Image (spheres, rainbow, N blue to C red):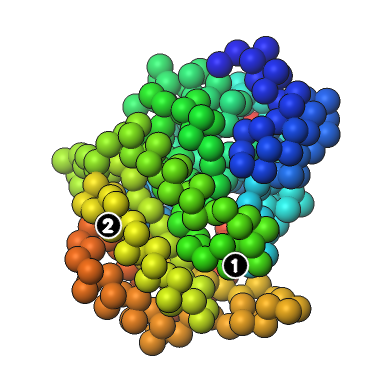
Amino acid sequence: MTPEKICAIMKDCTLCPRACHADRAGGHPGFCGESAVIRGARAGLHFWEEPILSGTKGSGTVFFSGCNLRCVFCQNRGIALGKAGYEITPQRLSEIFLELQDQGAHNINLVTGTHFLPQIALALEMAKPSLDIPVVYNTSSYELPESLRLLEGLADIYLPDMKYFSPELSQKYAAAQDYFDVAMDAVREMLRQVGPPVSGSDGLLQKGVIVRHLILPGQTKDSKKILRRLHEEFGGRIYISIMNQYTPMGAFPGMEELERSVTPEEYGRVLRFAERIGIERGFFQEGGTVSDSFIPAFDGTGILKP
C-alpha cells in the first residue's frame, strides 16, 4: 500500500457498502464522518475482550474515530460520531503498534477501522518487521470483501460483530437494511483469509475468527436466527461470543424498547438455544456486565507521542 494508492482510493470513497463517493482526500468527510486523515481516540491495554484475547496482560487496543455503521444505541458514540479523536499519520500509527507491544500487549486490536483500511494496511506494513504479536481486526462487519483483502497477510484474527438478522431491525437502528447479508459475506472472507482457530501454548488465540453477537432488549428471536445461521454455515470453524452487555445510553424517541437492559431471562433463553443447536466453541458473559465501565475514556491516551 502506497500513499499514492491511498489518495486515489480516498478521492472517491467506496471502501464500505455505503459507497458514499466522498472526496475524503479533498477533506470532505464520508458517511463515516472522517476525511482521509487517520484519527484515533485511545490506544492502550484493554482487559475486557474475550479471555483468549485479553489474557493476563491485555489486548493492545486502538480505537479509531468515526464509523460507517452508526447504530443508534452505540456505546462508543463519542468516537463513532467523530466527537473525539486526534489526527495521526500512518507512521505514527505504526509506532503506536510497537509501543503497545512494548507494554506487553498480547495482540494489536484495531477497533472500528473500516474507513481507514488503506492507511491501517500501510501502518501494519511498516510495523510488521518488528511486530511479533497477532493483529486483531475488530469490526461491525459492515464491510466489503474486496476492502478486507487489503488486510490479507496483515490481520491474524478477525473479531466481527453480527448485530442484526432482520432487515427491519438493521434499517431501524442503523439505516442498513442489507446488514445481515453483507456481514455474512464479510465473515466468509475473514475465514478464507485466516482459517479455523489456532491457539498458542499459552491458550491465547493466534489465528481465527470470533463472531460477536450483542443481544438487544426484546430481540431474542432475532438473536436465535443469527446463531442458527452462523452455526449452520461455519460450525466449529469460528468462535461465537454471545454478549449481554447492552447498555442503554439515554432516551430513544420512537425506539423506547432500547431504553432498558437485557434481562437475565432473555440472556438465558439465548444461551440455552445456543447449547441446544450444538454451539460448542463459544463465550458467554456472566451477570452484572451491563455498565458503562466497559466504555474507556476516549481522551487521546496512547495516541499522541509521549
Query: Which label belongs to residue 232?
Result: 2
Question: Which residue in the structure is indicated by mark 1?
Answer: 168
Q: Is residue 259 left or right of residue 159?
A: right
Q: Residue at x 45, y 42 (%)?
A: 186
Residue ID at (65%, 48%): 67
Q: Residue 3 in the image: x percent, y percent? A: 65, 15
- Residues under labels 2 and 1: Cα distance? 23 Å
178 w.r.t. 90: above or below: below
- Which residue occupies the foreground of this view, 14 or 280? 14
As drawn, 173 above or below 9: below
Say which element carries label 2: helix
- At horizontal 45% and vertical 71% (from top left) the residue drawn is 222
Task: Assign the C terminus to one quadrant of the image.
Answer: top right
Disc assigned to residue 104: none
Amino acid type of the residue that numbered disc 2 sits on in the rendered structure: Glu
Q: Amino acid at mark 1?
A: Glu
Res 95 visible: no
Expressed as whole percent of the image width and height from the top left, the position of residue 12 reads 74, 27
Horizontal and vertical percent position of residue 221: 43, 76
Percent position of residue 108, x then y:
44, 38
- Residue 209 falls in image quadrant: top left
